[in-house]
Image (spheres, rainbow, N blue to C red):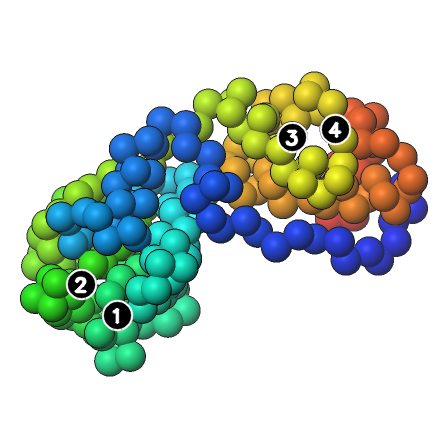
Amino acid sequence: MKQLPLDLQLPDPTGFDDFLIGPNLEAFLALKALADGESPESCVYLWGQAGAGKSHLLRATVARAGDAGLDALYLDARTVAPGESAHGHALLAVDHVDALDPAGQIALFGLINAQRECGFAIVTAGQQAPAHMPLRDDLRTRLGWGLVFEIAEPADEDKAALLRHRARARGCEVDESVCRWLVSHQRRDIGGLVSLLDALDRAALAAQRPLTLPLVRDFLRDAEAGN
Protein backbone atom coordinates (compact mmCIF):
# COMPACT_ATOMS: atom_id res chain seq x y z
CA MET A 1 0.00 0.00 0.00
CA LYS A 2 1.50 3.34 -1.06
CA GLN A 3 1.32 5.93 1.68
CA LEU A 4 2.00 9.64 1.37
CA PRO A 5 3.40 11.82 4.17
CA LEU A 6 0.10 13.46 5.08
CA ASP A 7 -0.35 15.27 8.39
CA LEU A 8 -4.09 15.28 8.86
CA GLN A 9 -4.25 14.25 12.50
CA LEU A 10 -6.94 15.97 14.50
CA PRO A 11 -6.05 17.20 17.96
CA ASP A 12 -7.14 14.77 20.64
CA PRO A 13 -10.57 15.81 21.94
CA THR A 14 -10.35 16.59 25.65
CA GLY A 15 -13.74 18.08 26.56
CA PHE A 16 -16.58 16.54 28.54
CA ASP A 17 -18.65 16.35 25.37
CA ASP A 18 -16.00 14.09 23.82
CA PHE A 19 -15.81 11.66 26.74
CA LEU A 20 -17.39 8.23 26.32
CA ILE A 21 -19.29 8.04 29.61
CA GLY A 22 -20.23 4.35 29.62
CA PRO A 23 -20.35 3.12 33.24
CA ASN A 24 -18.74 6.31 34.60
CA LEU A 25 -21.75 8.61 34.86
CA GLU A 26 -21.34 9.31 38.58
CA ALA A 27 -17.71 10.38 38.19
CA PHE A 28 -18.56 12.38 35.07
CA LEU A 29 -21.29 14.37 36.82
CA ALA A 30 -19.19 14.89 39.97
CA LEU A 31 -16.30 16.38 37.97
CA LYS A 32 -18.59 18.63 35.95
CA ALA A 33 -20.10 19.95 39.18
CA LEU A 34 -16.60 20.51 40.58
CA ALA A 35 -15.53 22.42 37.46
CA ASP A 36 -18.68 24.55 37.66
CA GLY A 37 -18.07 25.39 41.32
CA GLU A 38 -21.24 23.54 42.33
CA SER A 39 -19.73 20.71 44.36
CA PRO A 40 -19.26 20.64 48.14
CA GLU A 41 -16.28 18.33 47.65
CA SER A 42 -12.76 19.71 47.33
CA CYS A 43 -10.86 16.47 46.68
CA VAL A 44 -11.55 13.86 43.98
CA TYR A 45 -9.40 10.86 43.07
CA LEU A 46 -9.82 8.76 39.92
CA TRP A 47 -8.29 5.33 39.42
CA GLY A 48 -8.36 2.66 36.76
CA GLN A 49 -6.26 0.97 34.15
CA ALA A 50 -4.28 2.90 31.55
CA GLY A 51 -6.45 4.09 28.67
CA ALA A 52 -9.69 4.11 30.66
CA GLY A 53 -10.09 7.88 30.29
CA LYS A 54 -8.72 9.31 33.54
CA SER A 55 -6.45 11.84 31.83
CA HIS A 56 -9.28 12.88 29.53
CA LEU A 57 -11.51 13.59 32.52
CA LEU A 58 -8.81 15.57 34.35
CA ARG A 59 -8.13 17.71 31.28
CA ALA A 60 -11.85 18.18 30.68
CA THR A 61 -12.34 19.33 34.27
CA VAL A 62 -9.53 21.87 33.97
CA ALA A 63 -10.78 23.11 30.59
CA ARG A 64 -14.35 23.55 31.83
CA ALA A 65 -13.19 25.34 34.98
CA GLY A 66 -11.03 27.64 32.85
CA ASP A 67 -13.96 28.42 30.57
CA ALA A 68 -15.92 29.39 33.69
CA GLY A 69 -13.22 31.88 34.63
CA LEU A 70 -11.50 29.80 37.31
CA ASP A 71 -7.72 29.61 37.60
CA ALA A 72 -7.19 25.93 36.77
CA LEU A 73 -4.02 23.92 36.11
CA TYR A 74 -3.30 20.39 34.84
CA LEU A 75 -0.03 18.66 35.79
CA ASP A 76 1.27 15.29 34.56
CA ALA A 77 3.38 13.91 37.40
CA ARG A 78 5.35 11.76 34.95
CA THR A 79 6.97 14.87 33.53
CA VAL A 80 6.34 17.74 35.96
CA ALA A 81 6.62 17.34 39.72
CA PRO A 82 4.16 19.46 41.73
CA GLY A 83 6.10 22.41 43.12
CA GLU A 84 5.52 25.92 44.40
CA SER A 85 3.97 27.00 41.08
CA ALA A 86 1.13 24.52 41.66
CA HIS A 87 -0.10 26.39 44.73
CA GLY A 88 -2.93 28.90 44.66
CA HIS A 89 -5.00 27.57 41.74
CA ALA A 90 -8.75 27.41 42.26
CA LEU A 91 -8.71 23.97 40.65
CA LEU A 92 -5.63 21.77 40.36
CA ALA A 93 -5.45 18.43 38.55
CA VAL A 94 -2.47 16.11 39.10
CA ASP A 95 -2.33 13.09 36.81
CA HIS A 96 -0.33 9.83 37.22
CA VAL A 97 0.37 10.38 40.92
CA ASP A 98 1.79 6.85 41.12
CA ALA A 99 4.81 8.18 39.19
CA LEU A 100 5.83 10.62 41.95
CA ASP A 101 9.18 10.14 43.67
CA PRO A 102 9.42 10.60 47.47
CA ALA A 103 9.95 14.36 47.17
CA GLY A 104 7.00 14.66 44.81
CA GLN A 105 4.80 12.68 47.19
CA ILE A 106 5.63 15.07 50.02
CA ALA A 107 4.84 18.01 47.74
CA LEU A 108 1.48 16.53 46.70
CA PHE A 109 0.59 15.83 50.34
CA GLY A 110 1.16 19.51 51.10
CA LEU A 111 -0.80 20.60 48.05
CA ILE A 112 -3.86 18.57 49.01
CA ASN A 113 -3.80 20.12 52.48
CA ALA A 114 -3.28 23.62 51.07
CA GLN A 115 -6.09 23.33 48.51
CA ARG A 116 -8.52 22.21 51.18
CA GLU A 117 -7.49 24.95 53.63
CA CYS A 118 -7.93 27.63 50.94
CA GLY A 119 -11.32 26.32 49.81
CA PHE A 120 -9.84 25.25 46.46
CA ALA A 121 -10.29 21.93 44.65
CA ILE A 122 -7.83 19.22 43.64
CA VAL A 123 -8.41 16.26 41.32
CA THR A 124 -5.84 13.47 41.13
CA ALA A 125 -5.53 10.19 39.23
CA GLY A 126 -3.56 6.96 39.34
CA GLN A 127 -3.88 3.34 38.28
CA GLN A 128 -4.86 1.88 41.65
CA ALA A 129 -7.26 2.60 44.48
CA PRO A 130 -5.70 4.77 47.21
CA ALA A 131 -5.22 1.88 49.66
CA HIS A 132 -3.14 -0.03 47.10
CA MET A 133 -1.01 2.81 45.77
CA PRO A 134 2.79 2.44 46.23
CA LEU A 135 2.94 5.78 48.05
CA ARG A 136 3.51 7.22 51.51
CA ASP A 137 0.87 6.20 54.04
CA ASP A 138 -0.13 9.80 54.74
CA LEU A 139 -0.53 10.56 51.04
CA ARG A 140 -2.67 7.45 50.49
CA THR A 141 -4.92 8.70 53.28
CA ARG A 142 -5.18 12.15 51.72
CA LEU A 143 -6.04 10.74 48.29
CA GLY A 144 -8.99 8.95 49.87
CA TRP A 145 -10.19 12.06 51.72
CA GLY A 146 -12.93 13.00 49.30
CA LEU A 147 -14.69 11.30 46.41
CA VAL A 148 -12.97 8.25 44.91
CA PHE A 149 -14.12 6.81 41.57
CA GLU A 150 -12.94 3.83 39.58
CA ILE A 151 -13.01 4.75 35.89
CA ALA A 152 -14.16 1.58 34.17
CA GLU A 153 -13.74 0.61 30.55
CA PRO A 154 -16.82 1.15 28.34
CA ALA A 155 -18.55 -1.73 26.60
CA ASP A 156 -17.30 -2.77 23.16
CA GLU A 157 -20.41 -1.46 21.39
CA ASP A 158 -19.83 1.96 22.95
CA LYS A 159 -16.20 1.94 21.80
CA ALA A 160 -17.30 1.10 18.25
CA ALA A 161 -19.79 3.97 18.31
CA LEU A 162 -17.07 6.34 19.49
CA LEU A 163 -14.74 5.27 16.67
CA ARG A 164 -17.44 5.92 14.10
CA HIS A 165 -18.11 9.35 15.63
CA ARG A 166 -14.38 10.12 15.52
CA ALA A 167 -14.19 9.09 11.85
CA ARG A 168 -17.14 11.31 10.94
CA ALA A 169 -15.46 14.22 12.76
CA ARG A 170 -12.57 13.76 10.33
CA GLY A 171 -14.99 13.75 7.39
CA CYS A 172 -14.51 10.02 6.90
CA GLU A 173 -17.42 7.64 6.52
CA VAL A 174 -16.52 4.22 7.88
CA ASP A 175 -18.74 1.17 8.00
CA GLU A 176 -19.86 0.08 11.45
CA SER A 177 -18.44 -3.40 10.81
CA VAL A 178 -14.94 -1.90 10.54
CA CYS A 179 -15.28 -0.22 13.94
CA ARG A 180 -16.59 -3.42 15.53
CA TRP A 181 -13.70 -5.40 14.03
CA LEU A 182 -11.12 -2.94 15.34
CA VAL A 183 -12.59 -3.10 18.83
CA SER A 184 -12.63 -6.91 18.89
CA HIS A 185 -9.26 -7.54 17.22
CA GLN A 186 -6.96 -4.67 18.18
CA ARG A 187 -5.95 -2.64 21.25
CA ARG A 188 -8.90 -2.38 23.57
CA ASP A 189 -8.20 0.96 25.25
CA ILE A 190 -9.90 4.03 23.76
CA GLY A 191 -6.69 6.01 23.20
CA GLY A 192 -5.03 3.22 21.27
CA LEU A 193 -8.12 2.56 19.15
CA VAL A 194 -8.55 6.23 18.25
CA SER A 195 -4.87 6.55 17.30
CA LEU A 196 -5.17 3.46 15.09
CA LEU A 197 -8.31 4.81 13.41
CA ASP A 198 -6.57 8.11 12.68
CA ALA A 199 -3.63 6.27 11.11
CA LEU A 200 -6.03 4.15 9.02
CA ASP A 201 -7.86 7.25 7.82
CA ARG A 202 -4.58 8.83 6.68
CA ALA A 203 -3.61 5.60 4.93
CA ALA A 204 -6.98 5.44 3.16
CA LEU A 205 -6.60 9.03 1.91
CA ALA A 206 -3.04 8.36 0.74
CA ALA A 207 -4.10 5.20 -1.11
CA GLN A 208 -7.33 6.82 -2.40
CA ARG A 209 -9.29 3.87 -1.10
CA PRO A 210 -12.35 3.71 1.16
CA LEU A 211 -11.73 2.73 4.76
CA THR A 212 -12.89 -0.88 4.55
CA LEU A 213 -11.88 -4.12 6.22
CA PRO A 214 -9.60 -5.14 3.30
CA LEU A 215 -7.74 -1.81 3.66
CA VAL A 216 -7.48 -2.29 7.42
CA ARG A 217 -6.01 -5.77 6.99
CA ASP A 218 -3.57 -4.52 4.32
CA PHE A 219 -2.46 -1.66 6.58
CA LEU A 220 -1.93 -3.90 9.59
CA ARG A 221 -0.08 -6.51 7.53
CA ASP A 222 2.23 -3.84 6.08
CA ALA A 223 2.77 -2.31 9.53
CA GLU A 224 3.65 -5.71 10.99
CA ALA A 225 6.04 -6.46 8.10
CA GLY A 226 7.77 -3.12 8.67
CA ASN A 227 8.51 -3.89 12.34
Q: Which residue corresponds to the image point at 57% horizontal and 51% vertical from the top-left?
A: 12
The reply to whether the C-beta atoms of the residues labelled 2 and 1 are less than 8 Å apart is yes
Q: Which residue corresponds to the image point at 24% horizontal and 80% vertical from the top-left?
A: 84
Report x, y in % for residue 171. 75, 40
Between the C-alphas of marks 3 and 2, the distance is: 38 Å
Label 4 packing within 10 angstroms: few (<14), some (14-19), many (20+):
many
Work out whether residue 5 or residue 73 is closer to the camera in this orientation and state it. 73
Q: Amino acid at mark 2?
A: Phe
Between the C-alphas of marks 2 and 1, the distance is: 7 Å
> Is residue 122 visible from the viewing direction of this image?
yes
Task: Report the residue marked by disc 4.
Answer: 174
Left or right: 175 as drawn, with respect to 134: right
Task: Report the residue marked by disc 1.
Answer: 89
Task: Report the residue marked by disc 3.
Answer: 164
Q: Dividing the picture into quarters, in which one does residue 129 lie? A: top left
Q: Amino acid at mark 4?
A: Val
Q: Amino acid at mark 1?
A: His
The reply to whether the C-beta atoms of the residues labelled 3 and 4 are less than 8 Å apart is yes
Between the C-alphas of marks 3 and 4, the distance is: 7 Å
Between the C-alphas of marks 2 and 4, the distance is: 44 Å
Q: Amino acid at mark 3?
A: Arg
Q: Nearer the viewer, mark 3 or mark 2?
A: 2
* Direction front: furthest residue: 68
Report x, y in % for residue 170. 71, 43
Report x, y in % for residue 87. 22, 74
The reply to whether the C-beta atoms of the residues labelled 2 and 4 are less than 8 Å apart is no
